[in-house]
Amino acid sequence: MKPKIRLCVEHPLGPGQPVALTREQAHYLFGVMRLSVGATVALFNGRDGEWSAEVVDAGKRGGTLECREQTAPQGSPPDLWLCFAPVKKTRTDFIVEKAVELGVRRLLPVQTEFTNSERIRRDRLQAHAVEAAEQCGATFVPEVAELVRLDRLLAGWDGARQILFCDEALAGQDAPLSGLAPGPWAVLIGPEGGFSQPERDRLRGMDAAHPVALGPRILRADTAAVAALVLWQTRLGDWQ
Amino acid sequence: MKPKIRLCVEHPLGPGQPVALTREQAHYLFGVMRLSVGATVALFNGRDGEWSAEVVDAGKRGGTLECREQTAPQGSPPDLWLCFAPVKKTRTDFIVEKAVELGVRRLLPVQTEFTNSERIRRDRLQAHAVEAAEQCGATFVPEVAELVRLDRLLAGWDGARQILFCDEALAGQDAPLSGLAPGPWAVLIGPEGGFSQPERDRLRGMDAAHPVALGPRILRADTAAVAALVLWQTRLGDWQ
């Protein structure tokens, strides 16, 4: 069972719409995947749903596809953000990939007191999100925001967006996830060292923030991100 | 906040019990982590809980710790198995690590019709499970079984153990996870290509097998494993 080739593009998509390929896309389709004129590819751009498109011109440095018909409507994950402290490269990539698969609207890298990385490669993480969307059949790619300090993020927080705050200090205690109201949400995951006490106090003082325990064992930051997203999706999101 | 060094050993643990280190353990504690005589380490063996132990002899090729006091009782995850088709190396390692953190009793690599790997390094995966338990504060290490063909595994299946069968053909449909009975369970995850139709028919014909949908998007095998374990743990396991 061969997976359908899916490509995220910038172009508008519609009946008969020609789509010019970038050099990288042409290399991938014609060099790596060995497609030739007449082959079919699935395209999406985050706005116009998924379209089947035919290769009408294939070159080494470019090429053109032509949209045939819409194969899926434009979808959108629920209004859920993932705010996460960047960890090691592989694990950060992993968090981005998993968040796209599980379904989030926006990815916000946050710098907490115990976060080691002081910078991220936003463009690389965004490309990683695009790749994950191509792989998992999504028609939506979450935006990866610039790294922001947690205190600044919380200072400007819109109280209408509730925060699921994963506090490893609660490991083994009751998960109070029942009875939470629907609406805009954000899952907040700290770094491997957890949140600092001032950060924890600050969050506990916010009406919008709801601490949650993720089972009795200590989870790595990437595991906690996936677990919290699954919990949210099954209780309040589109997995219900 | 420095993480406590935890070490999984074979020895029995008890008050005053001396524990001889292997060459690798000595290298890790004294070479990598730079511990010396008098330092404290946490030990567990999967049977006697967690003990604090003091370094009483430190050498290049070995050393001795002495147990002081029990710091945690022996724990055990719920009676949950994870049966998974091995995927690429990194992702298989990831499945093992996450399963230990999320809490499973046993790991069973299964060969399905669409599984690419025909062999696994059982010892390497077991070592990976040990390392994950050391990191996540667990006192229990799940056993990694030898690779078994899915048809053989199902032919000898004990009907008292229910199977949560993650069927990506159900993506977007209702997840019927409510109303499932407690007891011994196994989560079953297929390879990237999914289950074959005969495998799917076989599972659908088993009273013990319960198909489950994991949201509207297509998940990679490793994401599906984590998602299914979180679902199970929050509904039937020790995350309730």
Image (cartoon, coloured by chain):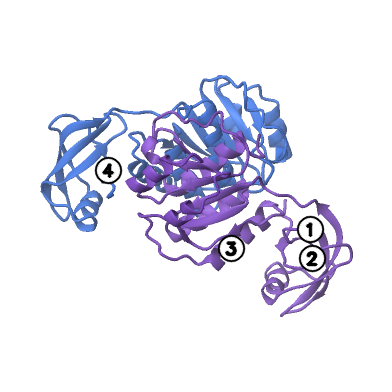
Chain colours: A blue, B purple
Q: Residue at the location (31% across, 28% down)?
A: A74
Q: Amino acid at mark 2?
A: Pro
Q: In the structure shown, which secondary structural element does the residue marked by tag 3 occupy?
A: helix
Q: Amino acid at mark 3?
A: Gln
- Res A170 → quadrant: top right
Res. A110 in view: no
Chain letter of disc 1 in the image? B
x, y percentage for residue B14? 85, 62
Image check: B192 left or right of B22? left
State whether discs 2 and 3 lie on one chain. Answer: yes
A45 and B155: which one is in front?
B155
Q: Residue at the location (57% across, 38% down)?
A: B232
Q: Which residue bears the numbered disc 1?
A: B48
Chain letter of disc 2 in the image? B
- Rounded to the nearest angstrom, the CA distance separating label 2 from label 3 is 20 Å
Q: Amino acid at mark 1?
A: Asp
State whether discs 1 and 2 lie on one chain. Answer: yes
| Disc 3 crowd, CA 10 A, few/some/many (<14, 14-19, 20+) | some
Q: Which residue bears the numbered disc 4?
A: A7
Q: Which residue bears the numbered disc 2?
A: B12
Question: Which of label 2 and label 4 is nearer to you?
Answer: 2
Q: Amino acid at mark 4?
A: Leu
x, y percentage for residue B190? 42, 49
x, y percentage for residue A188? 58, 35
Asked if the residue under mark 2 is in contact with the one under mark 1, i.e. CB atoms within 8 Å, the reply is yes
State whether discs 1 and 3 lie on one chain. Answer: yes
Q: Which residue bears the numbered disc 3?
A: B126
